Image (cartoon, rainbow, N blue to C red):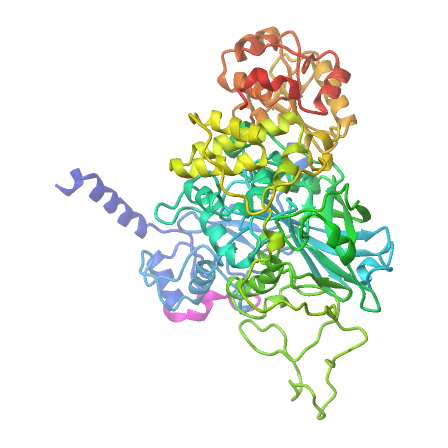
Amino acid sequence: MDEDRPGVATRSRKIRRGTVERACLHPDLPIGAPTRARHTALTRSCPASAQSPPAGASPWPRARSRASPLPNPATTGATPRATSAREVRGTGDELHQVAGNADATLTTNQGAPISDNQNSLRATPRGPTLLEDFVLREKITHFDHERIPERIVHARGSAAHGFFELTRSLAKFTTAGIFNRVGERTPVFTRFSTVAGGAGSVDTPRDVRGFAVKFYTQEGNFDLVGNNIPVFFIQDAIKFPDLVHSVKMEPDRAFPQAASAHDTFWDFISLTPESMHMIMWAMSDRTIPRSLRMIEGFGVHSFRLLDAKGRSTFCKFHWRPRLGLQSTVWDEAVKLQGADNDFHRRDLFESITAGNFPEWDLAVQLFTQEEAEEFPFDHLDPTKLIPEELVPLTVIGRMVLDRWPDNFFAETEQVAFCPANIVPGIDFSNDPLLQGRLFSYLDTQLLRLGGPNFHQLPINAPKCPFANHQRDGHMQMRVPKGRVAYEPSSLERTDGRENPAAGFRSFAEPADDGAKGRVRAESFADHYSQARLFFRSQTPVEQSHMAFALVFELSKVETPHVRAAIVGHLRHIDPDLAQRVADGLGMDALPPAPKAAAPVIDMPPSPALQIIGKMKKTLEGRCVGILVDDGSDAAAVAALRGAAEEAGATVKIVAPRIGGALLARGKKLPADGQLAGTPSVVFDAVALVLSDEAGARLATEAAAVDFVRDAYGHLKAIAVDAGARAVLEAAGVEPDAGVIDAANPAKFIKAAMTRQWEREPAVRTLP
Ligand code: HEM
């Protein structure tokens, strides 16, 4: 009866299989010994050898060996396999790769050699598994503990090693060695991040990007922990948990992930007018960057530089990408989330590993206390920037990122940036947001990295000598010697003694005569003037994008009074913007504006705040995709590729099949991406070189039609030959100045160096 029940039948087949004579992996038993006998020998007569064979003995002397010769890459064209292991099949046909001469022996974390990494120790061949199996337990325990708490903010990040090179001395202003010795290269580790999403979230949400640089200087680590936006949402650190709770997933429903477009965020913002300047930046294309290699970075707060006499000069830090600033358009950023979750990480990885090292200039804005008093805003308020037109930027050095980390976890995940990591010659200002940050980072890292010794991790350890009397704690890596762990002391020589000459000094700031208390400075009360400055400094296209973003975000807000409150704030910034957003939201009338705490003033526009105005016309560091199929003209493909590479771009071939396409008058051209998985969103410009036949075929292929339609909608240059025009027509694309004959690569390259902004009104309605 049981034989008729599939489950039972399978089980009985399995039982029979267990008694079949299989290859014996134990050295003390002959080939063909029944599995049960082999197992008894393993567990009873020789328990130790169950884990590690006797010295000198091979654990696999008589196993049924199918040692497969390694394929010769020269003849097969295959990637060489990076192992000299002998391959052996076990009794269940599982693969054992046995260490050859060039391979290290696998060991436990205690160093014990492991004889079998495929099978746990079992009481019988079919179980149960023995608790005694310390190899299994150690491996599983370590795995269970592989995840550490992710960062509460900026959880998703990508990082790289590199160096900072000083090109202009600041010796007049600071004793910091890193800013004194022109030509000196200081190692850096730089991590870029999104703020709101979890570690596994996508790379291209609308979000601020973190831009954190750890300089391993000769006087200790200096962490410049900034963002790609020069101002912040809030003026006081005590509001940070509220801000972050509002933007993160809503607590009852756990969505949306990595998105500000929801009620709690905009509710908080609507009640926090100090955030309106940052909101203007967040709604601009700055928060949907094309590449991490193409973002600016800002230290945000005013810092102090201190000279040898302890005199102070205020300093703001700016990073400027050599590749120029560039963003995506919103629809493109959204589609990138589907096309490639890791778009920015992959882009950074591919460019660094290909030797195209991203580079930034470091510039400073220097100003005195007296100059600061003349500014029409308070520079200690982190919702304010100092326009370049008021205090110009001086470039003092460059940062090059030239090495991808060896291990993501050990480096990118375990790195711990902290604004309090500072070196002599640099000091903090009284910015109340910065003051709170000085506490927060070390505090969170004690939890995230599991104890007080995370500074000993290689990625966090200073590269200069360090010595103190701090002791013990979780994961202490050092083995201090001697009796003395205190100071002052006289029993032994010890390393660490204080050093008034070279040690860190704080600026001797005279205390002002204000009274202690929980008060916000009145000079922080103007929330709209710089928001207006930013909006009015943008090109019309960028202003439209900001209005569009506001309409998009507020349309996701379900609560009408929150939408109304935001539009009310916008009225102080720019009445026209408020009207456009209100129209976009379908409001019948403009909501009332809240009372402004300080008069809103007009400042001269600052074109330096634009993206499009500052975008370099270049293809350097960009990527061009060429869609081909069987029969594509080899010469046309080669000419386009040559021209794009000549202009500094990377070229990727896209074809319906990953194996490539057989070109007319040419060879088979391997593809870098398959059409269905490589949409045009991942490119800066695209070309289609197709035979008439392939063009007609792909005109009915959704992926090909979308390839063109999206490139057009995302304002990219498109080169097409005669065969590809069928796809163009199927996509309903109206050829314009950015749609170019593939026979004219020079013209295509020129158009590809920018986006076709004038096309935008033809493809979407902007408020
Ligand atoms: C100007 C304002 C701010 C900027 C530019 C900024 C920037 C950053 C950056 C870039 C990171 C990621 C560091 C990394 O790559 O590991 C970060 C992490 C973090 N920030 Fe901020 N932040 C700001 C304000 C604040 C404030 C006000 C607080 C708290 C009072 C805060 C608390 C944190 C915490 C707890 C982390 C996680 C650190 C870790 O787990 O290692 N931040 N911030």
Q: Is residue 623 left or right of residue 144?
A: right
Q: Answer with the quarter of the image where residue 107 lies.
A: bottom right
Spot occupied by residue 690 in the image (x, y as percentages of width and height): 62, 12
Q: Residue at x 58, y 45 (%)?
A: 527
Residue 46 shown in magenta: yes
Work out whether 412 lies above or below 690.
below
Q: Is residue 552 left or right of residue 543?
A: left
Work out whether 269 lies above or below 433.
above
Q: Residue at x 15, y 43 (%)?
A: 2
Q: Residue at x 39, y 62 (%)?
A: 121
Q: Quadrant of the N terminus?
A: top left
Q: Answer with the quarter of the image where residue 611 lies.
A: top right
In magenta, the rendered stretch is 44-56
Please name whichever residue, 350 or 449, is drawn nearer the observer in this view of the structure: 449
Please name whichever residue, 450 or 548, is drawn nearer the observer in this view of the structure: 548
Spot occupied by residue 154 in the image (x, y as percentages of width and height): 55, 50
Spot occupied by residue 219 in the image (x, y as percentages of width and height): 76, 67
Q: Is residue 135 left or right of residue 211?
A: left
Q: Is residue 508 left or right of residue 308?
A: left
